[in-house]
Image (spheres, rainbow, N blue to C red):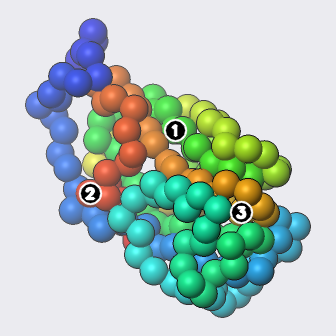
Amino acid sequence: MYGLKCNEALSTIIYGNGNGLKGEYFTNSTSTSGFDVTPTILRLDKQINFNWGSGSPDALISADKFKIRWTGKIRPLTDDVYTFYTIASDGIRLYINDQPIVDSWTDKSITVSTAQITLQKNTDYNIRLEYYSNAAAVSCILQWSALGICKQNIPSSQLFAA
């Protein structure tokens, strides 16, 4: 596989049958408060690819001062070092198998954070993504790349709700 470009087909890729991650949405929740036991809304999100602008993720969620926690499993497509990209305004934390790999829990404009971790194909890893918005633009995107895999939103086929 050495020398593959990100858009070349990998014959060893086996796509999963995932359906996304469990999203727990908490209204009127600040960055300094913990996650409530009971979310305001609970839903299945096929991908983490959201840009709500100055709005809200749902009519039941405040436009500012809310948090979201996505949980489930992630299944890599290849044995490789994966780069994860979080694109978010305000705070974001990403955990793979309960290991923090991105920790940027501060108010900020839309910022890209990256982290690398070695993963094995066809192995399910716990994933948790935590996000908060205090004000202004509301955006949260989760992407990955690896040898032979272009930087992309993580496909729902590789995400499994808890």
Q: Is residue 78 left or right of residue 95?
A: left
At label 2, counting other C-alpha atoms closer than 10 Å, the crowd grade (few under 14, some 14-19, many 20 or more) is: some
User: Which of label 3 and label 1 is nearer to you?
Assistant: 3
- Horizontal relation, residue 23 to residue 124: left or right: right
Q: Is residue 110 above or below residue 16?
A: above
In the image, taking residue 81 as reference, residue 46 lies left or right, namely left
Marked residue nearer the N-terminal end (1 or 2) = 1
Q: Which residue is identified by label 2?
A: 157
Distance of label 3 from label 2 (alpha carbons): 26 Å
Residue shown at 77%/61% (left/top)? 135
- Name the quarter where the C terminus is drawn: bottom left
Residue type (three-letter) at the residue carrying disc 3: Tyr
Please state which of residues 23 and 139 is positioned toward the viewer in this rendering. Answer: 139
Residue 101 versus residue 137 in the image, above or below: above
Q: Which of the two discs, 3 and 1, labels the residue nearer the N terminus? A: 1
Q: Quadrant of the N terminus?
A: top left
- Say which residue appears at 72% left-offset and 62% top-offset: 133
Q: Amino acid at mark 2?
A: Ser
Image coords of residue 117 (percent x, y) = 53, 35
CB of mark 1 within 8 Å of CB of mark 2? no
- Residue labelled with disc 3: 132
Disc 1 residue type (three-letter) = Phe
Q: Position of residue 14 (x, y in %)?
A: 17, 45
- Report whether residue 130 is seen: no
Residue in view at x 53 percent, y 56 percent: 51
The answer to whether mark 3 and mark 1 are in CB contact below 8 A is: no
Question: Earlier along the polypeptide chain: callout 3 or callout 2?
Answer: 3
Mark 2: which secondary structure? helix
How far apart are the alpha carbons under marks 3 and 1?
Answer: 19 Å
- As measured in the structure, the alpha-carbon distance from the residue carrying label 1 to the one carrying label 2 is 17 Å
Q: Which residue is mark 1?
A: 84
